[in-house]
Image (tube, rainbow, N blue to C red):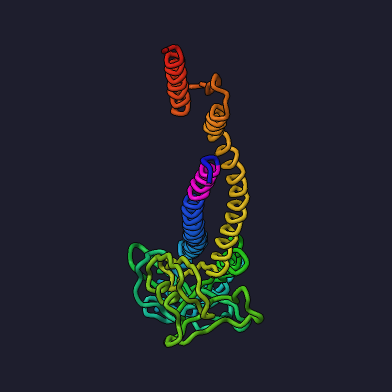
């Protein structure tokens, strides 16, 4: 194998090896970056939806505050234990006016300081009940109830105060469709992604509070505690988590972000199937391979051209030596540049000149 062939093979081998190492590194880095990007998108989407839900909850508080701040309502509630018959109808009219003016309230009920029901407007289930203790002085969501049409209502309580003393309590059944509309928006979650709210509405059972993306019916998914996934338990534990490769209610591996809704007995889950995410990464790898093959072909061609160009001075020197051996004694190697081949050609020419001078001297001797 001549030096030109060796140089060509060396150039091609170095090019291919460099490209292989770089390709493997870039493929791994790109897959990691793509995975991290998906994880950040899930996390950001969960946080954004949590903020949207919190805005709606704050709106509930403001609407409840408008009702509890009515002076007439508070004064009548304070008088109820002494004159219940005279108070009930007047409180009823106030509640009717508040409920018809605010569309989110499906039922409003008022209790006096002793826990007796003063009046109720609306017929949403369940029956009105007093709430014991408040963490929030304005309103507290105490639970959720399922409606007959597979909808969902929130149960909220707010204290009634007059002159700094607690004189009763307002209970409101609130329509949650605005919250559920938020979780039904799957934009940014690909073909398999879902977003849902899960809550422990009854002992021993978890309930997904709205129909899921791939669900054929409108019936809500109810899962016994013994069959609940680690994803649901993590979400309801109150920990904000970003999980990769966890299993969802279908037994499929998913990537998910969880959020516990503040002051609500509900958790938010945002997830996407792992196979969809890995499919995107596999497509990226396939494209890298296609590009690598194309570049490899260019590397082989480029290596052959570079090897030929690098070997050309050596080949010309070899041809010069061969011609001198065949009788062209005056022929000399071409010297161009200042590289090692040029230095070798120059030394070769000096050697040939010395050899020719020596022959001339030997020929002149008697």
Residue 147, x across and y down, in percent? 58, 81
Image: magenta residue range: 5-18
Q: Is residue 245 found left or right of 193 in the rendered image?
A: left
Q: Residue at x 57, y 71 (%)?
A: 175
Camera sees residue 51: no
Q: Residue furthest front?
A: 366
| Image-quadrant location for residue 162 | bottom left
Which residue is at the front of the view, 79 or 221? 221
Residue 126, x across and y down, in percent? 52, 83
Which residue is at the front of the view, 139 or 341? 341
Residue 93, x across and y down, in percent? 57, 71
Q: Looking at the picture, does residue 336 appear above or below residue 305?
A: above
Q: Residue furthest right?
A: 216
| Image-quadrant location for residue 165 | bottom left
Q: Main secondary structure of the magenta part?
A: helix
Residue 9, x across and y down, in percent? 53, 46
Q: Quadrant of the C terminus?
A: top left
Q: Looking at the picture, does residue 344 appear above or below residue 78?
A: above
Q: Is residue 10 magenta?
A: yes
Which residue is at the front of the view, 249 or 82? 249
| Image-quadrant location for residue 82 | bottom left
Which residue is at the front of the view, 320 or 36? 320
Q: Is residue 201 magenta?
A: no
Q: Looking at the picture, does residue 351 appear above or below residue 22?
A: above
Q: Residue at x 57, y 29 (%)?
A: 326
Camera sees residue 2: yes
């Amino acid at each position: 194998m001549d030096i030109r062939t060796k140089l060509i093979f060396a150039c091609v081998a170095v090019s291919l090896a460099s490209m292989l190492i770089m390709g493997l590194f870039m493929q791994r880095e790109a897959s990691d970056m793509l995975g991290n990007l998906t994880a950040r998108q899930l996390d950001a989407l969960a946080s954004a939806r949590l903020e949207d839900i919190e805005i709606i909850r704050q709106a509930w508080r403001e609407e409840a505050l408008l009702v509890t701040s009515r002076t007439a309502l508070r004064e009548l509630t304070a008088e109820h234990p002494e004159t219940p018959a005279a108070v009930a109808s007047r409180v009823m009219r106030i509640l009717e006016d508040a409920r018809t003016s605010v569309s989110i309230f499906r039922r409003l009920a008022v209790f006096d300081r002793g826990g007796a029901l003063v009046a109720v407007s609306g017929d949403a289930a369940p029956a009105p009940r007093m709430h014991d203790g408040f963490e929030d002085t304005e309103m507290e969501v105490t639970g959720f109830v399922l409606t007959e049409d597979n909808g969902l209502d929130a149960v909220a309580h707010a204290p009634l105060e007059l002159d700094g003393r607690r004189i009763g309590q307002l209970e409101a059944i609130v329509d949650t469709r605005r919250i559920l509309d938020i979780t039904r928006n799957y934009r940014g979650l690909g073909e398999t992604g879902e977003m849902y709210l899960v809550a422990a509405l009854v002992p021993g059972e978890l309930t997904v509070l709205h129909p899921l993306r791939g669900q054929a019916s409108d019936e809500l998914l109810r899962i016994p505690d013994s069959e609940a996934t680690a994803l649901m338990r993590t979400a309801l534990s109150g920990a904000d988590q970003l999980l990769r490769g966890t299993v969802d209610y279908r037994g499929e591996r998913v990537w998910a972000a969880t959020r516990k809704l503040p002051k609500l007995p509900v958790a938010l889950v945002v997830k996407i199937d792992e196979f969809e995410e890995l499919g995107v990464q596999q497509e990226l790898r396939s494209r890298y391979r296609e590009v690598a093959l194309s570049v490899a072909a260019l590397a082989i061609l480029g290596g052959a051209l570079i090897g030929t160009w690098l070997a050309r001075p050596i080949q010309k020197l070899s041809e010069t030596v061969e011609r001198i051996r065949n009788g062209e004694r005056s022929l000399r190697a071409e010297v161009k540049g200042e590289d090692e081949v040029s230095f070798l050609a120059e030394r070769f020419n000096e050697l040939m000149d010395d050899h020719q001078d020596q022959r001339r001297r030997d020929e002149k001797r008697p």
